[in-house]
Image: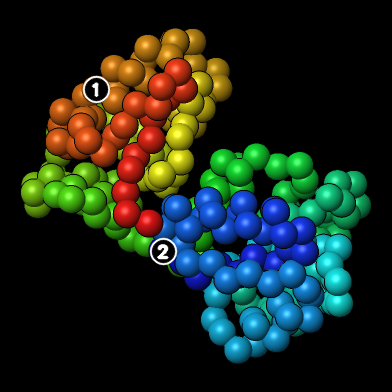
Amino acid sequence: MAEILIVEDEVSINELIKKNLCLAGHHCAQVFDGNDAIALAGREKFDLIILDIMLPGADGYEVLEQIQGTPVIFLTAKSELSDKLRGLSRGADDYITKPFQMLELAARVEALLRRTKRTEQYFELDHVRLDFERRLIFVDGKPADCTPKEYELFDTLVKNRNIALSREKLLDLVWGYDFEGGTRTVDVHIQRLRAKLGLEKRIVTVYKLGYRLEAPS
């Protein structure tokens, strides 16, 4: 779990980001103005800031100058290479252009938190514990006999918990875009995970789409 500040003046986008990151287990604060972002970041500590560039009050570059030391992902409609280079050269850790896919943003958030060592070290659900550092799954305190792909599949479900993932998306995230097998591979691995972890009621099938791990937010 991480403390994340969302700085985005378009309310619908701000709310969408907050909803999905909260479902993934993070705590999110929201501001819609650059000056408010500077003030809040000065009062509270955040593990990550998602920052638009074109903002009322201070723009994203000005905000970035005032919050040195906190990891930042720029999320902006400014898509020119010169804009991206400017943002990264000024200290942003990542740069995503609009329109964006929420799953990509969530993955970038998790990757940045891992790099800055400000993410959770383990995840627990019922009798199952996922140890991110050791890449192990424990059931009732004992290591589960899971293959590397089963671990990666469960890890992906955990990091996108409460979000419905299509079979195609899971295939891409776990096996890679160049994998030549079909989506039946995902179904087989899901069945094995359910049986090995005893999470038949937690790893649910989403009709005509894929799967979702249901967990307390």
Residue 175's x, y, as percent? 45, 25
Looking at the image, which residue is at 38% across and 56% down? 217
Residue closer to the observer: 73 or 54: 54
Looking at the image, which residue is at 86% across and 46% down? 79
> Which callout, 1 or 2, points at the residue further toward the start of the chain?
2
Name the residue type under label 2. Answer: Met
Q: Quadrant of residue 182?
A: top left
- Indicate left or right for 194 with 60 as reference: left
- Indicate left or right for 82 with 176 as reference: right
Give the vertical position of 23 relative to 60 (above or below): above
Looking at the image, which residue is at 60% across and 89% down? 43
Residue 57's x, y, as percent? 86, 77
- Residue that numbered label 1 is attached to: 191
Whether residue 125 is visible here, answered yes or no, is: yes
Q: Quadrant of the N terminus?
A: bottom left
Please rate how many residues cluster around mark 2, counting C-alpha atoms within 10 Å: few if below 14, some from 14 to 19, many from 20: some
Name the residue type under label 1. Answer: Gln
Q: Secondary structure at mark 2?
A: loop
Residue 27's x, y, as percent? 48, 67
Give the vertical position of 38 relative to 137 (above or below): below
The label shown at residue 1 is 2
Q: Quadrant of residue 145?
A: top left
For the residues bearing labels 1 and 2, Cβ distance under 8 angstroms:
no
Give the vertical position of 189 relative to 163 (above or below): above
Residue 9's x, y, as percent? 77, 64
Whether residue 131 is visible here, answered yes or no, is: no
